[in-house]
Each structure stands twice: as C-alpha cells, then as structure tokens.
Image (spheres, rainbow, N blue to C red):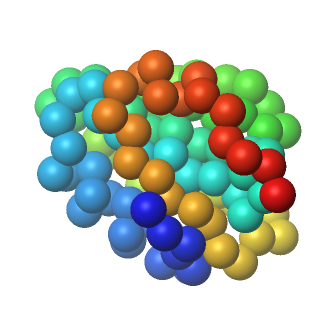
Amino acid sequence: MALVNIDSVIRTLLPKLEKLSPPQGIELLSYKRNRSIAVLLLGDNTFLVRERGYREEEQVVEKKGLHKYLKSLIKYEFPRSRKIRLYQINTPKDLEKPWKKL
C-alpha cells in the first residue's frame, strides 16, 4: 500500500479495517520489513492481532479495545520509526510469504 507517518497510522488503519470482510486484514511493517503487526478481521467485533518482531505473539482483541492495544504495540515494535508500511492482506496465508528485506 503505502508509507504512513507513525502519528497518523491508527487513524488510517481503523477506517480501512471497517471496509474489510473476514478473513482480510492489514499488516503494518517497519521500513526495513523486519518487524510487523498484522490485524486480521475474525468476525463482527473481533480481530486477531499477530505481532512479529521483538515478540512473537497472537491475541484476539475486541473492537472497543483495539485502538488502545494497537497504540501500545506500535510503540513497542516500532520505537524509533517515523514511517510505517501498510499492506492489505486478503488471506491469512499471505502473512507467511517473505517480504523483500532492505
């Protein structure tokens, strides 16, 4: 998709997630593509958040707590980043393909 300023990434991400249908999602990647956060839509109000970078974790989060959870994850995974890459995921299988490292 595009490079997005870290200050506006959540404001950009949440409206995009509203338009998706399950099992689509959005993946946030660091500039070098070595750390990522994937947000996959599971149902009406639930999301699977997969973190790969400093930690390797998956967690199911409800829609009302997603903003706060993503804010803390972005600070943890991308501490010195100013720009973050956004990619749309059509199936969970797309998360397994390797990205070109810079």
Q: Is residue 69 visible?
A: no
Q: Is residue 43 visible?
A: yes
Q: Position of residue 20 (x, y in %)?
A: 20, 44
The quadrant holding residue 80 is bottom right
* Quadrant assignment for the N terminus: bottom left
- Can you say whether 58 is above or below 25 in the image? above
In the rendered view, does 33 fall on the left or right side of 28? Answer: right
* Quadrant assignment for the C terminus: bottom right
Q: Toward the viewer: 19 or 79? A: 19
In the rendered view, does 81 fall on the left or right side of 41? Answer: right
- Can you say whether 91 is above or below 73 in the image? above
Q: In this figure, what is the number of numbered marks?
A: 0
Residue sitting at 57 percent across and 79 percent down?
5
The quadrant holding residue 16 is bottom left
Residue sitting at 84 percent across and 38 percent down?
54
Residue sitting at 78 percent across and 39 percent down?
53
Residue sitting at 38 percent across and 33 percent down?
40
Q: Toward the viewer: 14 or 83? A: 83
Q: Position of residue 12 (x, y in %)?
A: 37, 69
